[in-house]
Image: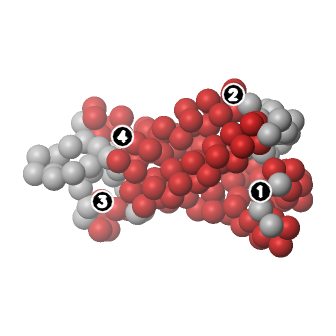
C-alpha cells in the first residue's frame, strides 16, 4: 500500500465505513428476504403490488451501493444513491412514527432490531453522514475511479482540483 497523505487516508476510512454500513444492511436482509418483506408491508406505504419487488430488490441495491463504495467505483454516484436511499428510509420511519406505528425499522434485518422512533431516526441520520461525505467530496484514494478512470481524489483536495 502506498503512502497516503493524512487527508486522503481519512477519506479512504470514511469511504470504507460508508461501504460497510450499506454492505451490512444489505447482507442482513438478503439472508431473510421473507422477513424483510413482512417488515416493508408493516409500513403500509407502497401499493401491495410493489411491496414484494421493493423488498426483494432493496437488499441487493444496498449491497451494490456498498460494493461500489468499497472499491471506489463511481464513488460520487454511489454516495448520491446512498443519500437518496437514506432520505427515503428516514421519510418512511418518520411517517410511521408520526402515525403511531410500533414496528421494527427493518434497517439491518435481524442484526439490530429497533423500534421506529427518535432513536432509529437519529441513528440513520448518523449512519448516512459517511455517504453524504462521499456524495459531496468523493474519496478516491486506492479506488477504481482513480486507477482506471484517472479521476482525482476530491476528498484530499489535490491542487488544481476544482471540486
Question: Which residue lies at the image location 44% right of the left edge and 44% below the top edge?
Answer: 132
How packed mark 3 is, by other alpha carbons closer than 10 Å (few <14, some 14-19, many 20 or more), is some
Q: Residue, x 17% and y 46% (percent of image)?
A: 158
Residue reaching furthest to the left = 160
Left or right position of 40 against 123: right
Q: Position of residue 68 (x, y in %)?
A: 50, 59
Residue 61 in sight in this render:
yes
Q: Which element is circle 4 on?
A: helix
Q: Marks 1/3: CA distance?
A: 40 Å
Q: Residue at x 87, y 50 (%)?
A: 42
Q: Give the mark count.
A: 4
**Which residue carries the number 1 mark?**
45
Residue pointed to by mark 4: 11
Instruction: Pinpoint residue 109: horizontal percent, then vertical percent.
Output: 79, 46
In the rendered structure, the answer to whether residue 103 lies left or right of residue 105 reads: right
**x then y, percent, for residue 15:** 44, 45
Badge 2 or badge 3: first in the primary sequence: 2
Q: Residues within 10 Å of mark 2 (few under 14, many from 20)?
A: few
Q: Residue 79 shows which numbered tag?
A: none
- Which of pointers 1 and 3 indicates the residue nearer the eye? 1
Q: Nearer the viewer, residue 87 or 55?
A: 87
SS at badge 1: loop
**Could you tell me how far apart the alpha carbons at marks 4 and 3 are, in whole angstroms?**
13 Å
Nearer-N-terminus badge (1/2): 1
Cα distance in 3D space between marks 4 and 2:
29 Å
Above or below, 160 against 110 in this view is below
Label 4, residues with CA under 10 Å away: few <14, some 14-19, many ≥20: many
Residue sitting at x 83%, y 54%: 44
Mark linked to residue 118: 2
Amino acid at each position: 500500500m502506498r503512502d497516503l497523505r493524512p487527508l486522503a487516508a481519512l477519506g479512504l476510512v470514511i469511504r470504507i465505513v460508508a461501504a460497510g454500513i450499506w454492505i451490512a444492511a444489505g447482507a442482513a436482509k438478503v439472508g431473510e428476504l421473507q422477513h424483510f418483506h413482512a417488515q416493508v408491508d408493516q409500513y403500509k406505504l407502497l401499493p401491495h403490488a410493489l411491496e414484494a419487488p421493493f423488498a426483494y430488490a432493496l437488499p441487493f441495491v444496498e449491497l451494490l451501493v456498498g460494493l461500489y463504495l468499497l472499491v471506489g467505483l463511481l464513488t460520487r454516484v454511489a454516495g448520491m444513491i446512498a443519500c437518496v436511499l437514506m432520505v427515503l428510509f428516514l421519510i418512511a420511519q418518520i411517517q410511521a412514527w408520526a402515525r403511531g406505528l410500533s414496528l421494527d425499522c427493518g434497517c439491518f434485518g435481524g442484526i439490530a432490531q429497533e423500534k421506529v422512533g427518535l432513536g432509529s431516526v437519529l441513528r440513520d441520520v448518523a449512519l448516512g453522514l459517511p455517504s453524504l461525505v462521499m456524495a459531496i467530496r468523493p474519496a478516491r484514494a486506492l479506488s477504481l475511479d482513480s486507477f482506471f478512470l484517472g479521476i482525482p481524489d476530491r476528498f484530499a483536495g489535490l491542487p488544481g482540483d476544482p471540486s
